Structure formats: C-alpha cells, structure tokens
Image: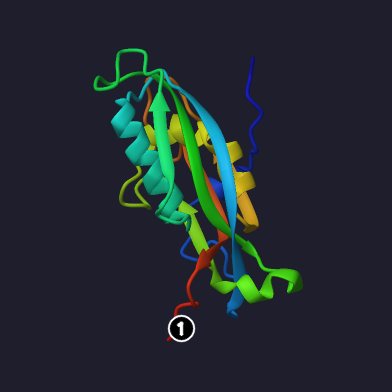
C-alpha cells in the first residue's frame, strides 16, 4: 500500500530566494492551540533509539514554533528502548500558534509568519537520513501548525540518503514579533 504524499516537482531546486517571500510581515496575534498526535515511525534505512526519536521529534516541533513544554513519548521500539530500531510509535502532546480571531484577541500573543525551508543540510539538526521521520510526521505537522504556501514532499528510498529526499517549505505562524529587516 502506497502512502499518499503531496508532490511538487520544482521544490527540490536550490533557490536563493526565501521560501515564503510573499508571506505577510506585519505583526499579528496568535493563540496557543492544543494538539495531540500519534506518529507511526517505520523505516528501512534510519534507526533511532526511543530516546533518539523523541529528541528528533521534539527538535522539529520546537523549530516550527511549538511551545517547549510538550510531551514526546516513544514506545514500541522493536529492539528495546535504548537500541536503535526501525520502528516506534511516538505520542506527542503540544501547543502551536493559530491565528487569533476577534473572539480570542484578549488571549493573543505576539506572532509573525516565519519562512521555513526544511531540507537536508538546510537545518542544522536534519540530514537526508531523516526522510522517513518527516514522512511519518507529515499529518501531524500539516494539521497542527498554521501555514501559508505550504509545500511538503518526501521521496524516501530504502537504504539511500539523498540531499533532496524531502522538503518542507512555506511560512509558519511563529511566536514573537517579526524580525527587523535591514
């Protein structure tokens, strides 16, 4: 059975332009929204210990703007909790920002749209080996964060690491004021 994936042919081309240059730059209000998700990780190439996959999932969520007070718990690592495994079930419980409508303006926090370009070697903690994990996280990442112009694609091949195996590009609603340009 093939997993459904969003495909986009030109996303893997290296470009000097920012991923989401058309995203709004003005400050806005966001509101913290609660999310619970289960990620079923299975890969033929990359192996993580339960602790390792928890750390990697946590890094990805924080990178996209999730609050740091999250819970990430991996279970079912096929070779035990401390040995690298090809599979795990990762349960996450976290908060990310969504746009604050008028009804939530009093609870709003400063937010801005931040350009994201997650490809191998573009983000310090990610490599081509992380393709299967980003493929497994696709549903959680696309539904739990607020995005503009999201392009999400994975082309994971068994026993192969490539520099264009995945790409997540767009603008995500992130906490804080927008950076000053100049």
**Is 164 placed left or right of 173 in the picture?**
left
SS type, badge 1: loop
Q: How is the image coloured?
A: rainbow
What residue appears at the point 42 percent right and 47 percent down from the top-left corner? Answer: 60
Q: Quadrant of residue 108?
A: bottom right
What residue appears at the point 64 percent right and 45 percent down from the top-left corner? Answer: 143
Find residue 99 and report its horizontal and vertical position in percent. 66, 65
Please say if 162 is above or below 24. above
Residue sitting nearer the eye, 11 or 35: 35
Residue lying at the far front of the rendered structure: 106
Q: Quadrant of residue 180?
A: bottom left
Residue lying at the far bottom of the rendered structure: 182
Find residue 85 and report its horizontal and vertical position in percent. 33, 19
User: Is residue 83 among what the camera can see?
Assistant: yes
Q: How many marks?
A: 1
Residue sitting nearer the eye, 66 or 17: 66
What residue appears at the point 67 percent right and 68 percent down from the top-left corner? Answer: 100
Please say if 56 is above or below 39. below
Find residue 94 and report its horizontal and vertical position in percent. 50, 48
**Badge 1: few (under 14), some or many (20 or more) residues near its Cα, within 10 Å?**
few
Find residue 23 and report its horizontal and vertical position in percent. 62, 69
Please say if 96 is above or below 142. below
Please say if 13 is above or below 104. above
Name the quadrant of the N terminus.
top right
Query: Residue under circle 1?
Result: 181
What residue appears at the point 41 percent right and 18 percent down from the top-left corner? Answer: 76
User: Is residue 24 among what the camera can see?
Assistant: no
Name the quadrant of the C terminus.
bottom left
């Amino acid at each position: 059975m093939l997993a459904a994936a969003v495909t986009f042919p030109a996303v893997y081309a290296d470009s000097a332009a920012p991923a989401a240059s058309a995203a709004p730059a003005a400050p806005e209000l966001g509101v913290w929204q609660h999310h619970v998700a289960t990620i079923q990780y299975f890969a033929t190439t990359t192996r993580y210990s339960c602790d390792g996959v928890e750390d990697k999932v946590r890094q990805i969520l924080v990178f996209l703007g999730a609050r740091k007070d999250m819970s990430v718990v991996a279970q079912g690592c096929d070779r035990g909790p401390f040995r690298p495994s090809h599979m795990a079930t990762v349960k996450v419980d976290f908060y990310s920002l969504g746009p604050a409508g008028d009804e939530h303006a009093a609870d709003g926090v400063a937010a801005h749209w931040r350009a994201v370009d997650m490809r191998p070697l573009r983000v310090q903690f990610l490599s081509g080996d992380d393709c299967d994990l980003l493929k497994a996280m696709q549903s959680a990442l696309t539904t739990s964060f607020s995005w503009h112009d999201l392009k999400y694609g994975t082309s994971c091949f068994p026993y192969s690491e490539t520099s264009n195996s995945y790409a997540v590009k767009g603008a995500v609603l992130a906490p804080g004021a927008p950076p000053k340009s100049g």
